[in-house]
Every structure is written in C-alpha cells, then in structure tokens.
C-alpha cells in the first residue's frame, strides 16, 4: 500500500475524511451514513452513549472493520484498509481503552515492539533517546525502563500514546482517554494532548460520558446517537447540557431531587460487623449502623476500603467474622443467599458480567435468576417459562433494555443495557432492602440518569437502599445518610442535607468526624 | 479468498439452529469417511466397498445389528452420564469407574440372595432385576458422589478425582472377581460368576429392555434441562458459577447432585453390559475394555454439545462404526485397530467441524478491486 499521504501535512489541511460510512451487523445498523472529517492540528471528539456506534466507527477508521458502504480519504487519497496494519502504515495510531501491552516487558520494549526498524537488531539506546525527545516535547513523565506491570493505568496509556507517536502517527485515536485516570493524571494528559495538537497532530478522542472533558479539550465534536450523526458542533459554542441533549435525544437532568419520604420503620440493623477480604485480612472492622424504610444510606469511599465486603456480607455472599445483622427484627447473620432473596433483600452487584448476569443465557433466562425460586413461577419442579417470558417482556420494555428480542443473549448487550436488565430483574422483586454496589459505574449519561431515577422510585415505595458509590456527587445528591468509609470503618454518619463535599472528601481520606470518638 | 468473480468470506455466526448444527455434523462425518478412505486405498481395498461392508454389517446385518444396538445402548448411557455434569460446567471422566461399581452393585444383589451358590433364588426375577438395577444405579451414584462432594465442599478438581476413582474401581472389580474374590467364577477363569438364565434381562424383539432405559434417560434429561427448576439451576451453574451462587443456587448441592445423577446413569451402563447383553451375563475378564469404551461417551457428549437428544444419533453412529470397523478389519484382512482408527478420524473431524458452529462461509459476488 502507498505510504506517506500525510507527510508534510500542514495545519488546517484535512487529514481524514470519511464519507457516508455505513456498517450493518445482523439486526442493527451500527453506523448509518456517517460523515466525519478531521484537520491537522485539530482535536475532534466523537461523543455518544454506549451502543451509539462509536466503537464501530473507531474500528473502521483503524482498519479493524471494513465498512459496508462509504469511503475513507487520507490526505485526499481514497484508501481501503484491509487490516490495522494498513492504517498504521498510513499514520493512524490507536490508544485502546483496554491496554494492549506486554506487561512483563519494559515501557521502551513495548514502544518499539512492532516498529519496522526494530526488526532484526535492537538498538534500544537510540530508540530510548528518540522516545525521550518525544516525552520532553509533549510533557510526558515516565520511566521508560520500568516494567509495564509496575505502571499505573495513566502511565500505561502514555506508553500506548508514545508507541503510536514513535511509529510516526499523524492521527491519534483515543478510546475513552480519561476513563481510568485520577484527576491529576487527567490534567496532565489534557495538557499533553494540547501540545500534540499544536504540533499538527490530529486527535480523535472517543468519549462516552465525561462531557466536561469534551468541553475542555476538543475544538469540534461530532455526536452520535443510534448510529447516526446528530450534531457536529464547534466546542466553544456548546454547554454540557446541550451536548447531553444531543447525545441522549432529550433533556438530561444532572441533579436528581432527593425525594422526601416519611421515615418509616427500621429495616436493617448492623451491629459491630466485621468481614474478611479475599486475601484474608479484616476488610470490615466492626461497623454498626441502622437503616429505615424509604431511606438511602450512602457509603462514600475509594474502592478497597471494605465497602465491597460490606455489600457482599449483607447479600449473604460472604461470611461474617463477627457481629450481627438484623433484618426486620430477624437475625439473618447466617442466612443463606436464597433465604435473603426470598425475604426481600435484593443485591445489585458491581460485577455485572462476572456475577450479575449469565452471558450465554437469554434475557428471559437471566430474569429467571431472581424468579426460578418464586412459588408463582413453578409447579411441581417445572418452571413456567411462559409466565417468565411474559414477565420478561413487561420489565424489559419498562426498563428500556434495548435488545432485538427476548431470546437475545445477555453477552450481546452493551454495558448500560446489561445494567438496566440487572436493575429490572432485582427491582421487579420489589425488595424491602436493596444493596446497590456501584450501580452507575461505567454507564453513559442517559443510563446513569435512568438508574438514579429508578433508585428514587424504589425509595418512594419504601425500600431501604444501601448505595455504594465512588462518585461523591452521586452519594451527596441521593443519600439521606452519608457514611464515608476508610479502611473498613465508618468515619462518621452524617445526614444527607448536612454533608458537605469537602468534609466528606476528607473523611474518605481517613479523617474522623469531629466529636465522634470510638 | 476470490474464486472467479465471486468472493469467499468467513463470517461469524451469531446464532446456530439445531438443523444447521446437524447438517454441519453430517458434513463432518462425510469428510471423515472420505479422509479415511485413503487408509483403504493404501491397503488396496476399494473404499466404497469397504464402507458398504461396514455399514451393511453394522446396520443391516442380522448378526451385526444387535451388536450395534447393544453398543449403542452402552454408549448412550455413558454419554448421558457425561452430559449431566457437563451441563453444570463439570467434567465427569469417571464413567468407567462408575459403571464398574454399578456392575458390582448388580452382582452384589445376586450374591446377597445366594444366587452365586445355588444358581437360583427364592425371589422371582420380577423382584431381583429391579433390585439389580437400583443397586447398579446406587453404586454408580455413590462413586460419583465422592467427586461431587469433594468438588462442592472443597473445590477439589473433579477431573482428577474421577480419574483416580477409575483406577480404584478397576482394581476393586479385579479383587472381587479374580481368584479368591467373593464374586469369583467357580471355574476360576478370572471372571465373575454367571447370571442364571432366570435373571437374564428380558429381551424385547431380541434386544435388551435397557434400550428403553437409555432412550428414556436421554428424553428425560432433555426435558429436565429444558423445563425444570433443577435443570435451570444446573445450567446456570454450568454457564457462570459465580452468577449462580449470587442467584441463590447452592454451589455445593449442584456438583453433588449432577455427579450422583451422572454416576447413576453410568451404573446402569454397567448393568447393561454385564447383565443384559446376550452372550455376556457376567463381569468378563476383559471388563477394562468396556471401561475404555465408556470414554466415547465423553466424545459423543461433546459432539452433541451437551444435548441429550442429539446424543442419540451420535452414539448410534459411533456404536455402529466400531462394530462395522472391527468386522471389515477381520473380513478384509486389514491390520489391527481399523475400528479405533476410524473412530479417531471421525472424532477429530467432528471436533474440527465445530469451527463452523461459530463461523460460516459466505460466497458473494466480488465488488471489484480496491482503489
């Protein structure tokens, strides 16, 4: 294939132009006549919910998929990619969300892996010097001799970017560039992206839900919805709200009003509960609290501070080391998982694929996970699949699970749809106590709003909800009580109205609430 | 790939209907037979003639057909014994051991009622035969339960446990039937005492009634997985044990249950071969051969993708070809092991063709060359 279409390309000249890209998968048009264009020195974001067709478009631009219709022009020349190798040769680099690096090798070894010059004899010293120069130019700080497994997610991403740049990329496709980064890492990355754009590189970030990032870095943004372009905008003229509207197709409420519900009867009392982690140390160290009907009890904390173990011990998936759990006046400390489902405790796990669903099962069979034991759904050991299908049809449409049919396998659902399915299944049991473990993590704007609204509805129906989230804003806006957790202990339990962002943040980092000595 | 003005492409399948799977399997069989015909050509035998001999002996010959059917019953039971734990995501490779213990159980009933010594019993066959069946099933289930219990309670690998139990059961049979063993044949030929004709398994149209057990078990299992609560729990456990546990399914009871069920069915296979096949009616000296044959249950189960009904034609084919293969080997003076070589080629072809369960070839008019 011809190379060098992009040699000496100047700022403002079109680098990639895609016209009328259409890609169909059985039952769905993933990309429907999409036009996309990017100029050298530009940052052109592609925004869309899960399932909007972002990944398909990205894979087409990188040569992983071939479009059914449409044309791609690179530097004005018509091209057809047979594989990513063609795209790489033409100067397109890709930074995957799920890193594709060899973790036992060093950063520099990963960067030169696959480079044509690294064919026979390795000249690591020269390569290192060249890569160092790139680092300095764009402000990347990284130890090139470190093994990849020692690096943080942000550093691994830097390695992928350097790999693409060293390969001579003029176009960088970034898949969810900030999704795994801490705030300081995000800040640094954005600065580097800016520096690269100044250097005539064209950068295409694909973003699902971090709208502020889009506004902060991009010059232009193309919004996708259901496979079609719904807007192509100059970023300077848009707001977060208007972007979200284009993306979801309707107004999105970013702040949900905390529903006022009369405080009901006590529903759950936890006394001095301690639990071991998988590694065998005490992850939860004697936590006590109580919950009432119609209350959301929010647990704020950075992951790994015992909140996961708390969720699992309440769901019955983990054994309590000490203490007791009383649900509606009954000691359930040693009750089985099944007993807890039957008495009205519902658990939404954070591991949606590994635990929350069965990939090879249809939607109906997945919904049956919470009903196979229900007296209304079997007689003499035979499941009433007809009734199950009817229920599934109802709740799938109520919860807006987008799937071709009820026979669709769960593994073919997007992340947001899978969470809708899990939520639908658990909530349709009308649990008295709902344990929601990271219910909105990784979802797009529309799905997050949906999940939060459903939690509020459950609250209005007098369910007690234990909400575990790493999103402090979510905890603060939804919870009636906020309990910041740090190293397996609550740093205090504060009424939701009084909880301030700063003080809760400090407690999540280990500062105990004043006046509470334990 | 391009052929003339057409383009041949490999596409991923999203769904696979039962019919498509059946057609792919039939193509695989044809492919395997075509491949194996080279062996006949090398031996200077016309492959068409050889296959005609194989199939007509196995499926149309008055001597061959009953042999095929008996082997089919045995294989189908072993396949079901494999499939039950397989659907729960567990591997039962303990069919040999389970069927040995099953056979011992059946003979123990006769031993207990003094049949060995007196060659007859006060009890009528209407009572003795059901007792033998129950004992065979219980024996197999008991051995299976060991693997299921260890898996469910301590998460000990079921493959290793069932395999080791195979050795134990093999030598247990040896201990029981060889010289000095309680089930020893009075003639001491290294085999067990023979069944008195009164407790020979009843024949229906010349075939042991166990054919109804085998077919019935397959149909029941199909129903179990498709419709019942317990079947649902087994399948959930098979696809995702963590999700099953989350849904309240016991990760202790399911392994125990499936291994007991699988073991019971394998125990019936033991009853079938040593107490129901005409001309055997004893635990023969070469009982290990039938243990080895039981592994074909695993292959039939894998080929039929765990579907107990699909296992019926597969087991019939394997049973027939092993009988027919052995026959031509003798008749055409071929080298030893033609039957097993044929089964091996068939097995590899069926497994290789499962590639087409996930992909399909699509022939479409070429759109011309790239710009």
Image (tube, coloured by chain):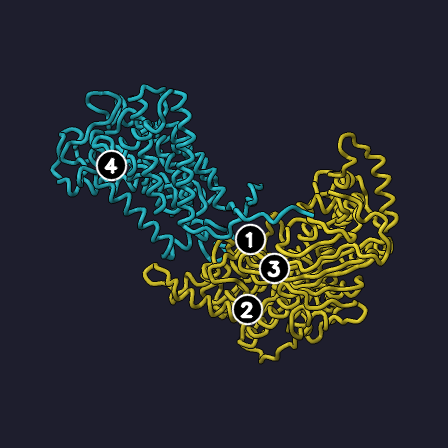
Chain colours: A yellow, B cyan
Q: Secondary structure at mark 1?
A: loop
Whether residues under marks 3 and 2 lie with C-beta atoms below 8 angstroms apart, the answer is: no
Whether residues under marks 3 and 1 lie with C-beta atoms below 8 angstroms apart, the answer is: no
Which residue is identified by label 2? A400
Q: Secondary structure at mark 4?
A: helix
Q: Looking at the picture, how far across and down is residue A266, in whole percent?
A: 54, 73
State which quadrant residue A414 falls in. bottom right
In screen coordinates, is B183 left or right of B158?
left
Bin the neighbour count of mark 1 within 10 Å (Cα to Cα): few under 14, some 14-19, many 20 and up. Answer: some
Marks 3 and 1, how far apart at CA: 26 Å
Residue B212 can be seen, yes or no: yes
In screen coordinates, is B162 left or right of B358?
left
Q: Considering depth in this image, is A54 or B360 the residue closer to the camera?
A: B360
Q: Mark 3 belongs to which subunit?
A: A
**Discs 3 and 4 share one subunit:** no
Residue A444 can be seen, yes or no: no
Which residue is identified by label 1? A354
Q: Secondary structure at mark 2?
A: loop
Q: Which numbered disc, 3 or 2, marks the residue that appears first in the sequence? A: 3
Whether residues under marks 1 and 2 lie with C-beta atoms below 8 angstroms apart, the answer is: no
Which residue is identified by label 3? A30
Marks 2 and 4, how far apart at CA: 58 Å
């Amino acid at each position: 294939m011809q190379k060098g279409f992009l040699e000496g390309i100047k700022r403002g000249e079109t680098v990639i132009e895609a016209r009328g890209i259409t890609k169909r998968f059985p039952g769905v048009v993933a990309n429907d006549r999409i036009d996309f264009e990017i100029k050298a020195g530009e940052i052109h974001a592609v925004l869309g919910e899960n399932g909007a067709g972002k990944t398909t478009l990205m894979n087409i631009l990188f040569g992983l998929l071939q479009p059914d219709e449409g044309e791609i022009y690179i530097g004005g020349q018509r091209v057809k990619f047979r594989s990513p190798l063609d795209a790489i040769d033409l100067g397109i680099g890709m930074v995957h969300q799920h890193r594709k690096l060899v973790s036992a090798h060093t950063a520099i070894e990963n960067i030169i892996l696959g480079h044509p010059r690294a064919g026979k004899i390795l000249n690591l010293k020269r390569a290192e010097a060249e890569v160092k120069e790139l680092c300095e130019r764009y402000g990347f700080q990284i130890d090139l001799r470190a093994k990849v497994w020692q690096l943080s997610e942000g550093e691994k991403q830097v390695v992928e970017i350097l790999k693409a740049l060293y390969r001579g990329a003029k176009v960088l496709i970034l898949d969810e560039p900030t999704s795994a980064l801490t705030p300081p890492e995000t800040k640094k990355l954005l600065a580097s992206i800016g520096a690269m754009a100044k250097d005539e590189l064209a950068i295409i970030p694909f973003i699902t839900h971090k709208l502020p990032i889009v506004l902060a870095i991009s010059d232009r943004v193309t919004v996708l919805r259901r496979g079609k372009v719904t807007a192509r905008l100059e970023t300077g003229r848009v707001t977060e709200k208007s972007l979200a509207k284009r993306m979801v197709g309707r107004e999105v409420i970013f702040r949900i009003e905390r529903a006022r519900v009369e405080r009901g009867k006590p529903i759950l009392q936890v006394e001095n509960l301690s639990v071991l982690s998988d590694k065998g140390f005490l992850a939860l160290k004697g936590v006590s609290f109580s919950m009432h009907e119609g209350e959301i009890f929010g647990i704020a904390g950075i992951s790994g501070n015992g909140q996961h173990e708390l969720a699992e011990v309440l769901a019955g998936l983990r054994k309590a080391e000490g203490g007791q759990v009383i649900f509606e006046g009954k000691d359930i400390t040693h009750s089985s998982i099944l007993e807890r489902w039957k008495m009205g405790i519902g658990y939404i796990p954070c591991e949606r694929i590994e635990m929350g669903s069965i990939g090879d099962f249809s939607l109906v069979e997945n919904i049956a996970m919470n009903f196979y034991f229900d007296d209304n759904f079997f007689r003499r050991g035979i499941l009433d699949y007809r009734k199950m299908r009817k229920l599934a049809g109802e709740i799938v449409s109520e919860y807006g699970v987008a799937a071709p049919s009820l026979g669709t396998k769960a593994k073919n659902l997007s992340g947001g749809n899978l969470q809708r399915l899990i939520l639908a299944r658990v909530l349709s049991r009308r649990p008295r106590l709902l344990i929601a473990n990271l219910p909105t993590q990784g979802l797009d704007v529309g799905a997050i709003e949906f999940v939060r609204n459903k939690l509020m509805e459950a609250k209005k129906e007098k369910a007690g909800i234990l909400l575990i989230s790493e999103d402090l804003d979510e905890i603060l806006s939804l919870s009636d009580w906020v309990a910041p957790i740090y190293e397996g202990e609550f740093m205090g339990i504060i009424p939701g109205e009084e909880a301030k962002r700063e003080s809760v943040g400090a407690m999540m980092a280990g500062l105990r609430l004043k006046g509470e000595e334990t | 790939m391009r052929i003339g003005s057409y383009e041949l492409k490999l596409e991923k399948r999203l769904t696979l209907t039962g019919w498509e799977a059946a057609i792919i399997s039939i193509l695989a069989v044809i492919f395997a037979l075509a491949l194996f015909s080279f062996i006949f050509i090398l031996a200077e035998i016309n492959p068409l003639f050889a296959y005609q001999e194989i199939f007509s002996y196995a499926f149309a010959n008055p001597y061959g057909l009953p042999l095929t059917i008996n082997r089919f019953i045995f294989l189908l039971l072993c396949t079901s014994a494999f499939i039950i734990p397989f659907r729960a995501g567990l591997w039962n490779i303990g069919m040999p051991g389970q069927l040995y213990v099953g056979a011992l159980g059946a003979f123990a009933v006769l031993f207990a009622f003094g049949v060995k010594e007196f060659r007859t019993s006060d009890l009528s066959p209407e009572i003795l035969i059901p007792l033998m069946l129950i004992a065979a099933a219980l024996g197999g289930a008991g051995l299976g339960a060991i693997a299921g219990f260890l898996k469910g309670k301590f998460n000990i690998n079921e493959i290793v446990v069932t395999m080791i139990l195979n050795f134990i059961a093999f030598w247990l049979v040896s201990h029981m039937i060889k010289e000095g063993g309680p089930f020893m044949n009075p003639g001491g030929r290294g085999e067990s005492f023979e069944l008195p004709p009164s407790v020979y398994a009843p024949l229906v149209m010349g075939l042991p009634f166990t054919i109804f057990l085998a077919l019935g078990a397959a149909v029941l299992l199909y129903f179990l997985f498709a419709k019942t609560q317990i079947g649902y729990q087994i399948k959930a456990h098979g696809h995702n044990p963590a999700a099953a546990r989350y849904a309240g399914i016991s990760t202790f009871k399911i392994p125990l249950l499936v291994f007991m069920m699988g073991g019971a069915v394998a125990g019936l296979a033991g009853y079938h071969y040593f107490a129901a096949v005409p001309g055997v009616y004893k635990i023969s000296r070469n009982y290990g051969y039938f243990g080895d044959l039981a592994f074909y249950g695993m292959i039939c189960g894998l080929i039929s993708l765990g579907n107990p009904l699909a296992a019926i034609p597969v087991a019939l084919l394997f049973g027939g070809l092993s009988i027919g293969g052995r026959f031509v080997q003798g008749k055409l003076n071929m080298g030893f092991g033609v039957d097993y070589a044929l089964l091996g080629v068939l097995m590899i072809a069926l497994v290789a063709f499962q590639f087409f369960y996930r992909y399909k070839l699509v022939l479409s008019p070429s759109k011309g060359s790239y710009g």
